[in-house]
Each structure stands twice: as structure tokens, then as C-alpha cells.
Image (spheres, grey):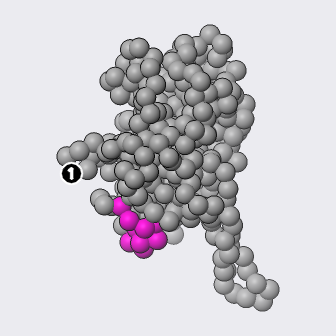
């Protein structure tokens, strides 16, 4: 019983619940955005945000109203995930079906990878001594895919890396008179349910899909085969999960649950079922992405429905 109590207390502390008067502080950092879906820090510590419905990338480092922000790029077709580099930005144009490179010195746009199917989440990883670029796609009505687009070009140069990722989740129910629960699939649709991918500090690649966060073994593979190995699963029992990131100091993974309006946290070193673990932050309006300031003390969270970026302080870190 004592061990169970200690575990419960540890989980409450991890989730940022009341510990010596400890509660998160939330305020509006930026407003007036048109469907902000993704944020990223540049190497120069500038905070960029993609406005999907205005087709723009903004520098929102100073906060305030979107009309006063610096426009980094415009005339994009549904910009979602972005990857800043020393020379410019890779941008996933969801509606345009491509990943574009934007040169920040002269503002030029160059197509990097074309013929993509609803590209959404971008990330990189070091594999075999080479920096690889990956993007998530909606390749069929009920299935997603993580695709290697390092070589750029058209469909013939794209390499499937994680395949057959289902856009459906199990809903548990109990037949009348039965003692055990069974499950039936619930289908999720829309690009917000596309797989989210992120590179951790140790260089490993993780994916969020089908209500689970898991490590991708080198070489990738089929979703079902990867999840059949328990050591690949980081967190199970999740709800609708959106953008995620790793805290720069404590190494924990933070992710948003858009319908619940929360930010939750999982420990990559302690795999398990996070179904009943309380959130770190709640009361947000359809959050879509979470990022941290360079020192990890400030949390920034997009809300695509409210068109704002929240600034959160005093969260558990």
C-alpha cells in the first residue's frame, strides 16, 4: 500500500498538481493569429509560428498582436510544421502537397519534396552518419506514414520509413453481463490527427500516433511490428495528441491534447499507461503545439481555434 501511495504522489508531482501551492500561471502572449499550428525556435533564438489559414510564417518573439509581427514568409499553401536551419526554413505545405525550403537571406522559395499527400509534421534524425529529413503523410483514408524526403524531388525519391500507421483508436466497452472489457475501433480523421514526429536530445526519433508515443527503431518498419516490441512504447492510453516536444532541461516529453485543452507530460525513461495521469496545464482552448524558451522556464502553447499563443510559467519542470 505504501508503494502505491508513493507512486500516486510521484505522478501528481510530475503532473504539476498542488505541491506547496504550486500552480501554473497562464496568460496570452500573442494574439490575432489565423490558425497557428506550429512553432519553432531558430538558431538565433527567434520564435517562429506558422499561420495555416493566412499562409504565412511569422516571427512572434516579441509577442503582442500578429499585425505587428515580422513576416518571414507568405503565400504558402497551408503551412504546418517548420524546421529552421542556418540558411533558412523547411516548411510542410499541407494543402500544396510539398515541403518547401525558404532562403532567409533573399526570401526565395524552392521546392524540396513534391507529390506528398497531406504533409504535416517535419523532423530530422542522424542515421548512419547522415542528417535525414522526415515528414508525416496521410497516404490513405485511414492510414498515415512517416516518409524520408532527404533526397527531395518527386514521389519516386521518397522512402517510406514507418508505414501503415492507423488513424483509429480503440474504444473500450463492456457487453451486458460480461466481466471483461472489449474494444472496437474509433476512426479519427483530419490532418490534426496526422502522426506527430520529434527528435529527442539523444538523437532517437519518436512518433505520436494512434494514442501512443513510441520510439522508432533504426530502419523504421510497419507500425504494428514496431509496437509489438514493448521496449519501443513510451506512453500508452493517451487521448487525442497534438504537437509535442522535449523539455531542454528535465528531458520529459510534453504534448498537447487539443479537445481536452490540456498539456500533459510523459517520462521517456518510464514507459507505461498514462491514461489516468493528470495534465500539467489545463483550461486552454484547442492547443495545437507546445514549445519552451531556451532556458526551459517558459512554455509557449498555440491555440489554433482562438488564434493565440499562451505563455505558461510556474509549471512543473
Reply above or below: 258 against 164: above
Farthest residue to the left: give it.
129
Q: Which of 263 and 59 is in front in this view?
A: 59
Q: Which residue is drawn at 66% across and 45% down?
A: 258
| Res 265 visible | no
Q: Which residue is drawn at 67% across and 56% down?
A: 189
Reply above or below: 259 against 162: above
Q: Nearer the viewer, residue 238 or 187?
A: 187
Farthest residue to the bottom: give it.
177
The answer to if 288 sits in the magenta stretch is no
Residue 4 picture location, percent across and down: 50, 65
Indicate the quadrant containing the C terminus: top left, top right, bottom left or bottom right: top left
Q: How many marks?
A: 1
Query: Helix or strand or loop: what does disc 1 sit on?
Result: loop
Residue 125 picture location, percent across and down: 32, 45
Q: Residue at x 59, y 61 (%)?
A: 140
Q: Residue at x 66, y 71 (%)?
A: 185
| Res 74 visible | yes
Crowdedness of circle 1 by 10 Å Cα count: few (<14), some, many (20+)? few
Farthest residue to the top: give it.
68
Q: Nearer the viewer, residue 59 or 246?
A: 59
Instruction: Determine whether, in the image, residue 175 is placed left or right of residue 59.
Output: right
Which residues fall within the magenta stretch?
A: 220-230
Residue 248 picture location, percent across and down: 38, 35
Residue 277 picture location, percent across and down: 57, 55
The answer to if 224 sits in the magenta stretch is yes
Q: Nearer the viewer, residue 137 or 177?
A: 137
What residue sits right under mark 1 in the picture? 128
Amino acid at each position: 500500500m505504501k508503494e502505491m501511495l508513493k507512486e500516486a504522489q510521484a505522478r501528481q508531482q510530475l503532473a504539476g498538481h498542488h505541491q506547496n501551492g504550486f500552480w501554473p500561471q497562464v496568460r496570452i502572449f500573442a494574439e490575432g493569429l489565423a490558425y497557428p499550428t506550429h512553432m519553432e525556435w531558430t538558431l538565433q533564438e527567434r520564435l517562429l509560428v506558422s499561420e495555416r489559414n493566412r499562409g504565412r510564417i511569422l516571427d512572434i518573439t516579441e509577442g503582442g498582436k500578429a499585425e505587428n509581427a515580422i513576416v518571414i514568409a507568405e503565400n504558402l499553401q497551408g503551412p504546418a510544421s517548420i524546421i529552421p536551419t542556418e540558411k533558412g526554413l523547411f516548411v510542410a505545405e499541407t494543402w500544396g502537397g510539398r515541403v518547401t525550403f525558404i532562403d532567409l537571406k533573399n526570401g526565395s522559395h524552392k521546392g524540396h519534396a513534391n507529390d506528398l499527400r497531406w504533409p504535416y509534421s517535419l523532423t530530422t534524425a542522424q542515421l548512419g552518419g547522415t542528417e535525414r529529413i522526415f515528414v508525416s503523410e496521410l497516404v490513405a483514408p485511414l492510414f498515415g506514414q512517416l516518409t524520408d524526403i532527404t533526397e527531395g524531388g518527386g514521389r519516386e525519391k521518397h522512402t517510406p520509413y514507418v508505414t501503415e500507421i492507423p488513424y483509429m483508436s480503440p474504444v473500450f466497452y463492456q457487453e451486458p453481463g460480461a466481466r471483461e472489457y472489449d474494444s472496437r475501433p474509433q476512426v479519427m480523421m483530419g490532418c490534426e490527427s496526422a502522426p506527430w514526429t520529434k527528435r529527442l536530445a539523444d538523437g532517437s526519433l519518436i512518433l505520436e500516433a494512434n494514442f501512443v508515443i513510441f520510439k522508432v527503431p533504426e530502419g523504421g518498419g510497419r507500425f504494428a511490428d514496431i509496437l509489438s516490441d514493448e521496449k519501443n512504447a513510451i506512453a500508452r492510453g493517451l487521448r487525442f495528441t497534438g504537437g509535442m516536444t522535449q523539455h531542454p532541461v528535465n528531458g520529459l516529453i510534453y504534448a498537447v491534447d487539443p479537445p481536452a485543452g490540456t498539456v500533459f507530460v510523459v517520462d521517456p525513461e518510464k514507459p507505461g499507461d498514462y491514461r489516468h495521469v493528470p495534465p500539467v496545464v489545463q483550461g486552454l482552448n484547442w492547443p495545437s503545439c507546445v514549445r519552451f524558451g531556451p532556458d526551459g522556464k517558459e512554455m509557449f502553447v498555440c491555440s489554433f481555434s482562438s488564434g493565440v499563443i499562451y505563455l505558461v510559467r510556474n509549471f512543473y519542470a
